Amino acid sequence: MLRVVNLEEIQNLLLQVPGIVELGDKGEFGFVSSVKNWLTHMEIVLKSNKLSVSANVAALRGYLVSSEKGVIPADISFVGRVSKRKVREATASHSISSAVEIVSEKISKDIERVEEANRVLRQLVCIAKRSGVVFDLPSDKNFGDALKSIWSKMSKDQVLAQGVVSVEGLVGPHDALILLDRTITADKQKGESK
């Protein structure tokens, strides 16, 4: 089970892919090195989160390294004349596409789990506001303590307790506080913008 910040780190790396693909689309020379750097970074992040798919990403990076040394991967075919650049770029495109597919599949259940926790938490916050649980967060150092106090009040409320247990079951107590903070902050910003 990935923590929220770790999941978001992986998602942020995935969000870099359109920019990298744009380099390939424009025929930029930095495309292959950008793909290799992205694969390396993704591999490090996955490995630090103890996700075995880091090996799959490393293998894809290996294909790219091999193509830079002149090896044509078996699963890549060409139309027209084959050049070293075409081989490297085709391998880079294939590698990043495969990596995105592998990583996206691996984190999909974690994304669903966090989305469900957010959905339940959104409902809990709405109910808590109506029942009078205080949501004013101080701007000083006691911010974390204030969040813990609000969460504690919610967990002691008969109406909210089951939802609190559900959220903690989905993401754990630490991430529940992170999501609570984001929900309250988002509501506060919406209120200020009106």
Image (spheres, helix red, strand yellow):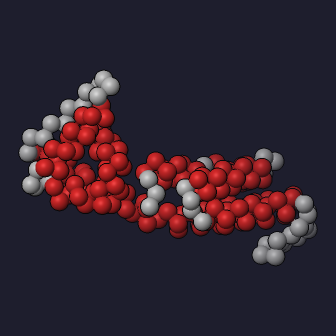
Image quadrant containing the N terminus: bottom left
Residue 165: x, y in percent? 23, 58
Q: Toward which corner of the image does residue 113 lie, by quadrant?
A: bottom left
Q: Residue 4 at what x, y percent from top left?
A: 43, 51
Residue depicted at x 10% and y 45%: 130
Inspect this view and state whether residue 11 appears: yes
Outermost residue on the bottom side: it is 74
The quarter of the picture where the C terminus appears is top left
Residue 64 left/right relative to 168: right
Front position in the image: 86 or 10: 10
Q: Does residue 73 appear to the left or right of 180 in the view shown?
A: right
Question: Which quarter of the picture shows residue 117?
Answer: bottom left
Tally of numbered discs: 0
Residue 182 figure quarter: top left
Residue 9 drawn above or below residue 77 = above
Residue beneath the point at 82% across and 59% down:
65
- x, y percentage for residue 24? 73, 53
Q: Is residue 188 visible?
A: no
In this image, 50 relative to 190: left or right?
right
User: Which residue is at the far top?
Assistant: 140
Residue at the (33%, 60%) spot, across then down: 170
Name the residue located 52 percent from the left edge and 53 percent from the top edge: 11
